[in-house]
Image (cartoon, rainbow, N blue to C red):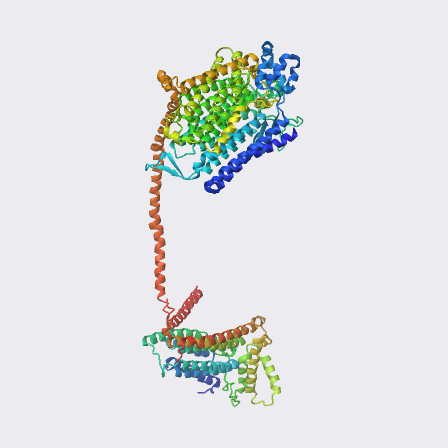
Amino acid sequence: MNDPINWQSFFFLLFGLVACVFALAVVFSSNIVRMAFYLILSLGSTSGLFFLAGADFVGAMQLLIYVGGTLVLLVFGVMLTAQGPFVSLKTRGGEWVLASIVGGALFAVLAQRAVSISDWHGPERPLTLADSGEAASQPDSATSDAAGPADETKESEPFDPDGARAEENAAEDDKEPAPPTHEGRRVELRDTRTATAIGMALSGPRVDSLGEPSAVRRGGMSSYVLPFEIVSVHLLVVLIGAAYLARTKKRFKTED
Amino acid sequence: MQGLADILPILLGAAWLLPLVSFVVIVFLGPRLGKAGVLAGYVASGAILGSFVLSAVAMLLWLGHHWPAGTHHEAHGAESHAADEHHAAGDSPKRARLQAVAFAADDAAPATHAADEHAAGADHGLADEHAERPAYAGTWYTMASFGPLELSVGYYIDALTVAMFTMVSLIATCIHFYATGYMHDELHDVTDHEVRMSDGRHLHRPGRYYRFFQYLSLFCFSMLGLVVSGNVFMVFMFWELVGICSYFLIGFYIERKSASTAANKAFIVNRVGDFGMIIGLMALWGSLGTLAFGDLPVVAGGKGDNSTATKAVRPGIFSLVRPAENHHALTTPDGMVRSAAAAAGVTDNAAAAEAGVVNDWRQQGLGYGLLVVAGLGIFCGCVGKSAQFPLHVWLPDAMEGPTPVSALVHSATMVAAGVYLVGRFYPVFTPEVLLVIAYTGGITLLMAATIAITATDIKRVLAYSTVSQLGYMMLALGAGGWLAGMLHLFTHAFFKSLLFLCSGSVIHAVHTNDMRQMGGLRSKMPYTAYTMLVGCLAIAGAGIPFLIGFSGYYSKDAIIAQLISFRNHNSGFHGVLFYVAAAGAATTAFYMFRLWYLTFAGRPRDHERYHHAHESPKVMYVPLMILATLAIVAAWTLPGTSLSLANVLEQARPAGEHGAGRWWTALVVPAEHLSHLGAVHVEATLIATIVAIAGFTLATVMYGLGVLNPDDVRQQFPRTYAFLRDKWYFDELYDYAFVRPTMLVSRLVAGFDKRWIDGFIDSLARWTRGLANIDDTIDRYLVDGLINRLADWTYGFGLYLRNVQTGRLREYVMLIAVGTVALFVLATFAVGLVLAG
Amino acid sequence: MNLLTEPVGLTHYLLVGAVLFVCGVVCMAVKRNALGVLMGIELVLNGANVNFVAFANGNLRSDGDWALGLDGHLIALFVIVLAAAEAAVALAITLNFYNNHSTVDVDRAEELHG
């Protein structure tokens, strides 16, 4: 290995492998409790992938809602419907074969689609940074200077030409006293900014349109107030509906 | 006058429409009017009673405005004494003398009359212009107008109309009340003993009380409409309505074969007459362009009133035929002259415009034939309706109807309609037509009277008597005796309805029509017997000569006097009419008393029936008494005044004289006043009385006293008897002459129909069926087969697809995945193809 | 090609997403336990979410101008929220099914077959 380890790739591989392996484990496990556990691990590492892709708010929500909420719900469900000690419902082998064939075909199609477009293979200029932006903030790499633009363009590259972004970053940097570690903090700042932008978009204005030079794209940036409201009402309905469906019905109960 | 012109149409119109209201009510509510429709009788009787009251009021109003002056012969009586004053004679002071006394007074100066005779024609024409001849014509409602032709509901009201209206409604009222008693059998279920069903039992049917009165009301409406109608079109409408009512009523016992046959016969025979009538109407309208009797104001909607001469009027038929400027002499109307000229091809338009040319043509006699045709045509209708020879055959058969019907329809009113129409159209008839009328009447009179001698059915005797008396009227009219004929029409209506109702009462009591099973009923039913005796005396013309008599005495005297006058004016053969009339009078007296003796006198011949006989209820004999009274007094003059039926009718006498014929100049129709000349009158009275007494005596000898056995007489003249009994073989003659040839032709036509036309149609039908079968096969196997196959496929495919829906969740997931992959692959191929293309 | 030294691209994310998605589909297809099916659904949704987030980032691809940007994040958020709602309702249905049939075997729920 001549090249230094690209830590971003490293962590991507780590989280990706964990997610895939535990997803497969969910499929092949026949114990429902274990399936739930494997699913937690798989979803958790997926949230790591989100962080890596610069979606800090989405990753956080993944952890909070999925891992913290939905899966707890699932586990409750597992406990409530437990039929004796770890009853497993066996699936016939033929179905396994059939499912494998169909799944394999589906995967083949999807993978072929993913691989077939060369633009998607990676960024144009090689990213030589060893440092990934998540929590490490290691400035020890020699090419740390190049990591800055790489990291910050996670979010801002589509919005800004390099020069403008650099100036802005520089202006922000002025406020911060610690130059060597400013890269990691900048990532943090940008994550905060993502959350703000999402919050603003959900309540109306699109702050990311301010730096958008293309009028066409600016026009396409719509407000998310209406979907937000719809989803709110939807959640309310689901809440009531779920409560209604899951409540204990007296007529099915016997007195003793 | 203006007031009368306004009020008379209202009164008579209301009286005319009341029976229609009753008819409508009974039609719609009939069975619900009380139990079994018993109220229908009261409704109908009330309506006709109302009509009578209204028409009586009209009559009184009429008399109030137009008090009848003295009769013609009275005027001439004055004339003869003071010749210079004869113009003033028209409005001479009313004379308080009985008519009979007037006859006697005329005897005083027979010589002057003889001298006066020939000048009388012209003089009288002048006198006519001054005579009061009130008539009100108008239109109630115009239904349609096509060019000059107006179809309207109008009226023509003169003294004849009012008197006829009153007479008809009076008799109809009596008969209605009588019928409420007579028809009470119909109030419950009826077993008709004359009808046998196929299973041998008698017909049992529900009563038809209300229906009877429904028909009666419709009949009264029609008859009154006929009387009041102001144009020929309306006359024809009601003429036919009367005919159809007659049809309904004759066929009232429709289940009896004889009744339905008689109804058909009456209707068909009347059609023959109506055919002629339509020809007459076409001749009139085609040449005159109007159907109205009287002059009508040009402005539509206004009431016609002849008294206001300032108004522009459209001349009616009467004014056209007898224009006032021509002293009401018979004149061929311009229209007829032009039509005839056009037909003869002697016209050209320029010349036709000049009145002088028309007058020349008129002098040449152009158009006169058209007038004759019109008159003959109208008379044809009257022949049918009034049962004159040769269309008399339906009337005796019409006796199949209930007796009140016979009384009302077939003696007093409907058959009188023909005579009435002749009287109404009198101005239009040319002397030639009148001669035809006279001979028709004469033949009818003699024939019917002789048949009546041998008839044994009580109603048939009366029916033939009716025919005979109608012949009398026609004879009188044809001989120029308008007043005589009309007077006889009225008096006959009274006594003939009386006679029929009496016979109905008898039939009601003994349940048979056959006089041979009656006899001695006088003690059982005195009211009926003596009212009927009154009727017999009236029809025989009984009276004390020159003093007083029953109503028939006056009318028959007048007729015979007119015939004597006719004989005196026409040399040669025409005198036979007088002898016919005299013989008829004798025969009438004979057969009427024969009837009375056979029915009421002597010993009962059928004790069973005699035993059950009983006097009719009050509701039946009270009308008899009313009619009997009228039969006596109808022709009397009210003492102290000049009010008499004859004088009232005199007001309606058609203007103008007939004089000599154009084609047959030897023919002279004498003016009626000539018959009042003393010599003629005395002769007539004596002859009438003598022949009546002769007939009465013979009847008394043969049937009353039994001195001369009728059977002996019968054996003495077997052929004559058979000839008379078989009604002169008219039915057989018609059977051979018309019915059988018609049937033969019908059979031929039917055979042709069956063989050729039916065959053609049948083969067409077979063709169509064959085509339809082929079509059916194609439909069934090709079209339906295709559709059914498609439906089966769809159904099977659906069943097959059903298996895919297993309900197993995991298979669905699998299918979704497979589908996704397939979509991807397909899309890839598609993109590839697009790119390649 | 050294994965550890090369920068990762969109393709890598998409492959991970595809693995998760296919695992979810297969899970739904083979699990007879209703809760297993639910877990499969969660996996499918997560695979989709990985794609959304990856597409949102322009740095992972050479044609960065085509990235979804903030919209991708927002849609991913909505997916998470709706997945939570769906999970709640599906669990309620499962509980109901369990109450009625005393089992969570989805093969027993075939009353709606055609």
Considering the image in quadrants, where does the N terminus of chain B appear?
top right
In-image side of B407 versus B652 (left or right): left
Above or below residue B503? Residue A109 is: below
Taking depth in this image into account, of A76 and B86 the one nearest to the observer is: B86
The reply to whether residue B648 is in sight is: yes
Extreme residue in the front direction: B523
The reply to whether residue C62 is in sight is: no
Q: Indicate the position of residue B436 as horizontal and vertical percent values.
A: 49, 18
In-image side of B819 versus B28 (left or right): left
Above or below residue B681? Residue A128 is: below
Q: Residue B726 occupies which quadrant of the picture?
A: top left
Q: Residue B79 occupies which quadrant of the picture?
A: top right
Taking depth in this image into account, of B773 and C95 the one nearest to the observer is: C95
Q: Indicate the position of residue B668 as horizontal and vertical percent values.
A: 54, 14
Q: Indicate the position of residue B716 as horizontal and vertical percent values.
A: 36, 15
Considering the image in quadrants, where does the C terminus of chain B appear?
bottom left
Q: Indicate the position of residue A167 as horizontal and vertical percent values.
A: 61, 82
